[in-house]
Amino acid sequence: MMTLLETLARGAGAIAAYAAVGVILLIVGFYVIDLAIPGRLSSIIKTERNPNATLLTSSGLAAIGLIVAASIWASGGRLAEGLTATAVFGLVGIAVQTVAMLVFDRLVGISVRELVKEPELQPGTRVLAVTHLAIGVITAVAVI
């Protein structure tokens, strides 16, 4: 039987491990979005204060967070399997979001590259932001 201290230490270790995987996925997601947008994303958001780049990045990262949370929930307490599933499902979610941006660019005519050139928040940005969140929810539910 585990003592309270052992249980707390094990739980804290699991939290730290899942948080690390989640942060890594968020960083990967940020840089994937950065590749889709002309210029340096951090500069576009921080210096230019571009609302389109900010909303697209925020919604993409929120979607990744949903996928990570669902992966943790679905892990059922099995740490190694849960961490692996979280990493894999998070990367799949990032890939699906990227493909969705390309599809919307080609088929629907909503271009991320064009949107981030605009200084005012654009309707197409709102559509892509909701698309990111929808993909995140769909992927998260698929994980569960």
Image (cartoon, helix red, strand yellow):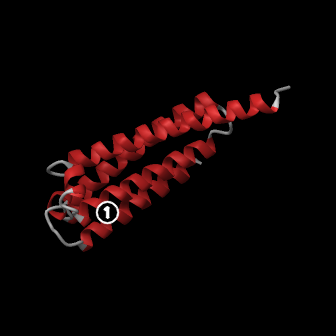
Q: Residue furthest top?
A: 1
Image point 36% across, 48% down: which residue? Answer: 96
Q: Nearer the viewer, residue 117 or 126?
A: 117
The quadrant of the rendering that contains the N terminus is top right
Q: Is residue 102 above or below residue 29?
A: below
- Judged left or right of residue 79, residue 94 is left
- Name the residue beneath numbered marker 1: 55
Image point 37% across, 54% down: which residue? Answer: 60
- Judged left or right of residue 85, residue 134 is left
Image point 27% across, 55% down: which residue? Answer: 101
Q: Nearer the viewer, residue 48 or 105?
A: 48
Q: Is residue 3 above or below residue 33?
A: above
- Judged left or right of residue 137, residue 1 is right
Residue 65 x, y percent position in the rendering = 47, 50
Q: Residue furthest right?
A: 1
Quadrant assignment, res 128: bottom left
SS under mark 1: helix
Residue 106 x, y percent position in the rendering = 19, 58
Quadrant assignment, res 75: top right
Image point 43% across, 55% down: which residue? Answer: 62
Looking at the rendered structure, the kind of residue marked 1 is Leu
